[in-house]
Amino acid sequence: MKKLFTFGFMMLASVAVLAAGQPQRNRPFESKVRTARSIKANSVRPLGSVLRSEGDGIISSQPSGTLYANYARDGIGWYAYMGSGYATPYYAYLGRVVVDGNDYYFLNPFNTLSTDTWVKGTRKGDVITVKTPQPILEYTDSETGQPTVLYAKRLVWNSDSTSFQPDTLADGSVDYDITFRVSGDSIIQTDGGQLALCSEGNDWYGYGDEQVVYSLVTDKENVAPDGLNFSTYTLAYKAQDGTADTLVAKVALTDDRVYLTDLYPNLHSCVVGTRQGNTVTFPSGQYLGANSYYKSHLYFVGATACKVYDPVYEETYDSYSINDKVTFTIGEGNVLSSDSTYLLNAGKSLLYYVQDFATPKLVPFVAKAATPLAPYSLDADLSNEPTSGLNYVSFYMDKVDTQGNFIDPALLSYQLIMADADGSNQQPYTFYADTYSGLGDDTESMAYNFTNGYNIQGSWNQRMVILYDEIYGRLGVRSVYTVADEARYSDVAWFVTQGISNVTSPDAGVGRVEYYDLAGRRLAVPGRGLCIRSVTYSDGTVKNMKLLRP
């Protein structure tokens, strides 16, 4: 079974990009069933730019009460893509519940759309009733700036199972109640409907969850002993789909234990193995924590390759079965190698993994100054109106230097280069923190590992950047590798672009930056929502762009 990972460069280049409430459809997870259901119908509505809001009854701040942050949530999650609705099961998704007396509040009720807002239920006996509709998010039209409130509402299948509709009962009334039963440490949905994202007029936006179960996670992360000496290693591995990669991890060895950390980007939990001579055994099922990046409770689990028959597609595919351990051998120079496979898995019993690691090998590594390879396979479209969010560049970067040696991706970055039409007068493009969320400050060098899931994205060695400024002359990209404050640069690779103007020199400095609301009133500080950023350059050129702040 292939991992559910679609980077979606072309999709992002052809539709308006979300600023907040990003759909999580690109989470690279393995599903036990590849596709539960799909709908190709006009009922799936497009979703514009999303804003969290306190207005209109939307609960975007954590309610008062006791927060239970260690729930895992399983269910069926729907998401919209290219005018269709798709469903897929999910496991061990992060579940946060606040309890205030008999009131229960559930954060992010949609697995595939992070709204950062809450829905409220009320408990009576062992039953929690979530009365709907409840306002859940607000989206803003990118052209008009007009806000529209969307609702969490209970829907059921229509008569021909082509879409969802309100549940009209025999007496003509409508059942809008989502119900859960409290059973021990679990909260189990019992009503058989979907908590769906809808307009006030029941238009379904393609997002919703059903068959939801919250289970309390009591597992604890490993804690490495104080004073342990971790060394930097490269981690090379293969995946079942034929891809291969090399990462940087941390390893600590003692006489009877081996500790591994940083086994994957945005994952810093510790895995512990028992050492007997040169053999190290890592038990399966070690808890890696409630990971906010992957939005799941992750576990280290051993796996064995196997064949599985898919009755939906009527085909047999490669997959895994979970086993109880992973074994490594320690060789010369403290190299660790294995013929086994391990997974970073959402949950520890059902197969739903972030990444598979077949025949992993860990080798000690020391970063040295090196010249990185230039980016390649460049693609760009700058032909659209600059503020549309449709202009983009994408490119690939390899984690090797010009001699073919591996380099640490944590020390690798890239710069977009603006120049005159003949390639002269080069200067780095500035990534503004008010445009690219997740940046602490404006920067000219973007870290290779950085992605905000919105207008800067990365998948494997491919990178994509949405551009909002008008670009003059020529545009390129180069790699930068910095070790101990020594930066080395690759050659500049130039994009073949459409719609680049030659009106203004790219070395015109920024004179001032001002912000205005959509009515043209000047703002001291840009707030949430749409505003206009006006940049005046030293040559008198003024550029205005729409800025969406979540």
Image (cartoon, grey):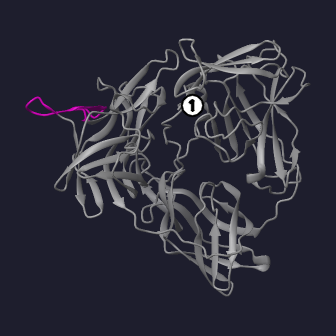
Q: Residue furthest bottom?
A: 277
Residue marked by disc 1: 11
Tell me which amino acid carries mark 1.
Answer: Met
* Residue 41 appears in the rendering: no
Quick check: is 485 in the magenta stretch? no
Q: Position of residue 380 (x, y in %)?
A: 71, 28
What residue range appears in magenta? 156-174
* Residue 104 appears in the rendering: yes
- Which residue is at the front of the view, 243 or 345? 345
Few, some or many residues within 10 Å of mark 1 (<14, 14–19, 20+): some
Q: Position of residue 492 (x, y in %)?
A: 86, 35
Which residue appears at 13% of the width and 34% of the height? 169
222 w.r.t. 7: above or below:
below
Where, by quadrant of the figure, is residue 470 drawn? top right
Which residue appears at 49% of the width and 53% of the height? 30
Quick check: is 165 in the magenta stretch? yes
Which residue appears at 87% of the width and 21% of the height? 420
Question: How many discs appear?
Answer: 1
